Amino acid sequence: MALKLFNTLARSVQEFAPLDPAGKKVGLYCCGPTVYDFAHIGNWRTFVFADLVRRTLEFSGYDVKHVMNITDIEDKIIQRVRENKTTLREFTGKFETAFLDDLKALNCKEPHVKPHATEYIAEIISLIEKLVARGVAYKAPDGSVYFSIAKYQGCGCHYGQLLKLNFDEMRAGERVSSDEYEKESVADFALWKARVPDDGDIFWPSPFGEGRPGWHIECSAMSMKVLGESFDLHLGGEDLKFPHHEDEIAQSEGATGKPFVKYWLHGAHLLVEGKKMSKSLGNYFTLRDLVAKGFTAREVRYLLLTAHYRETFNFTLDGLTGAKSALARIDECLGKLRDIAAHGRPESQSQITPGEVPFLKESVAISLQDDLNISAAWANVFEWVRSVNRLIVENKIKPEHALYALKDWETTDSVLGIGANAAAEAPTEIIALADARTEAKKAKDFKRADAIRDELKAKGWVVEDSPKGIKLKKL
RNA sequence: GGCGGGAUAGCCAAGUGGUAAGGCACGGCUCUGCAAAAGCUGCAUCGUCGGUUCGAUUCCGACUCUCGCCUCCA
C-alpha cells in the first residue's frame, strides 16, 4: 500500500510519488520558527506534525532530506531588538536555542539542514535580481523591491494555486490602509524592504540599496538552494497558505519557470480549552508553561498527536492529564513485556508461537499511509496493548515472544516517537519505607502497611504488590 | 463581503450508504488482606429540518452554531 497525502495544490488526497526517478530520495521543507519569542503550543502542533510526516516517510522507506528554516530577520524581531536594547544575534540566538531545546524535548527529529535567513542574504539578493530581470519585480520610489502579481500573471503564471483568490471581493481597503509601502498594486508584496531609521544597524547592502529581505523570499531562496528548484514536500500551518506559501510559489516559479513544490501539506490550528488561544484568556501556553504545570514534553507530544493533522484540535489541560494515563497504560504493558523478556516465566506451559502475538507495525503503517490517520494508529496501538495484556494474563507470553513483541513496538515507535518512559529510580528513603511496608504485611499488620502506603503516596510514589514482589512507581 | 474547514457519548477523537474505532473519566465483576495494575463487562442512533435511497451519521439542499484565511500569525 502506498503513502497517500492530502495535497493542498490538488485539494485532495493523492498517492505520494517522489520526484526522484529512483523513487528513493525525498526533499522536505517545513517553515520554521520566527525566533522572536518562545514557541507556543500551536506552533508545536505544526512541528510535531512535520515530524510525523518525516517519520512516516522514513518508515515507508524513503531517504528524507528535512530542511527547516530559522527566520532570524523580520519586523517583529527588529522591533524587539530595539525595545530590549540588544543585538540581533544575541536576541535571536536566545530564542533559537530555546526552540531547539523544546523541539528535542518533544522528541522531534532534528532537521538535517537549518538555514538562517541572515546567512542566505546573497542567495536572496540573487533571486530578487532574477525576478527583476524577468520583469516580475520592480523597485518602488521608496527603494523597496516588490513582486508584481499582474506581471507574473501576464506571463501566463497562475497566482492562487493553494486557494481560490478573488481580488475584487477581498477587503482591499483594509490592506491599503494598513500598508505603509509604495506598491503599484495592493496585492504586490515586498521582496526587499528599504532601510528605514527604525531598523537601526540591521540592514544589508544590495544592488537595490541598503535594506533587508521581505518575509516570503527567504523561504524560496533557502529551500531552492538546499533542495533544488523543484522539490517534493513543503509543510506549514494552514494560516501560511496565503499569502506566505502562495507568494513563495510565485517568487520561485517566477524566477525559475519550473514547478516549485509537488506536494503542499498544511496542518490545522488548535484551540485551547475550546477557545482560540490568546494571552488575555490565559490559555496561551508555551511548552515551558506546561512543564511548569507538571506535565512532560512526552505527554504534550502524545496529546498533539492524537488528532488528525487537518482537523482543528482542542487542546486541554484535562486532555494532558488523560494523556498521562493513556501513556501509563502503554508503559505498563511494555514494562511487563520487559520483565518477561528479562526473567522469563518458567511456569509458562503454553506452546504458542510468536505469531499469536499480534503484529503492530503493519497495522500502524497502514493507518498512517492513509493520509496520516494517527487516531486509527493509536487505536491499533491500544488494541495491541489489550491483546498483549490478555496473553500475559493467560500466561501465554514466553521470553522469546516478549522479545519479539518489544522489537515490534520499537519499530512502531520509530514512527510514533513516544519513546520509553523515563523510569525513575526510587531513592533509598522510599525503598526503606516500601520495605517497612512489606514487613508489616508479612506480620499481617495491614493497618500499618496501609499507613505506609499512604505516606509513600504523599511523597509521590505508588507501591504495587505482585506475586513477584513489590513495584515502585513515581506518580 | 469573498474563500475554506468543523459540528459524533461527560471530555478528546476515528470512521462507514446497511444501525458507530480508540483513549480519558465513570459503574459492575474477577484478582487482591485492602489497593494498584491487568482481564471481563456496562455506557452514543452521529447539530436542526428536508431530499435521494430498500436503507444515511455517512450523499444532496437549507438552516443554526462554530473555527480559520483575506492584515503579523503554526
Image (cartoon, helix red, strand yellow):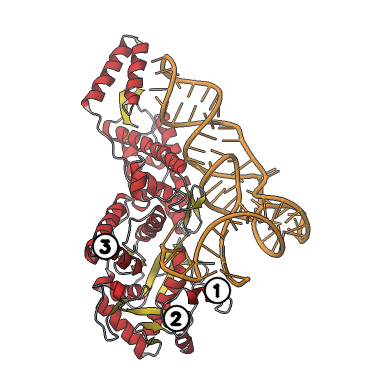
Q: Nearer the viewer, residue A144 or A441?
A: A144
For the residues bearing labels 1 and 3, Cβ distance under 8 angstroms: no
Residue for point 42% across, 72% down: A245
On screen, A290 above or below A63?
above
Question: Label 1, on which residue?
Answer: A171
**Sequence-first tag of 2 and 1:** 1
Q: Which disc is residue A188 wearing?
A: 2
Residue A2 locus on image (x, y percent) = 44, 62
**Subunit of label 2:** A
Instruction: Tell me the mark number nearer the camera, choosing from 2 and 1.
Output: 1
Task: Choose the circle earlier in sequence order: 3 or 2.
Answer: 3
| 1 and 3 marks on the same chain | yes
How many numbered marks, from 0 up?
3
Q: Position of residue A69 (x, y in %)?
A: 31, 67
Residue A417 shows in the view: no
Q: Residue at x 37, y 45 (%)?
A: A290
Q: In the rendered view of the protein, which quadrant contains the N terminus of chain A?
A: bottom left
Q: CA distance from mark 2 to mark 1?
A: 15 Å
Q: Badge 1: how crowded within 10 Å, few (<14), some, or many (20+)?
A: few
Q: Quadrant of residue A406?
A: top left
The verdict on a common chain for dots 3 and 2 is yes
| Amino acid residing under circle 1 | Arg
Q: Circle 3 sits on which residue? A: A92
Give the Cα separation between the discs numbered 1 and 3. Answer: 34 Å
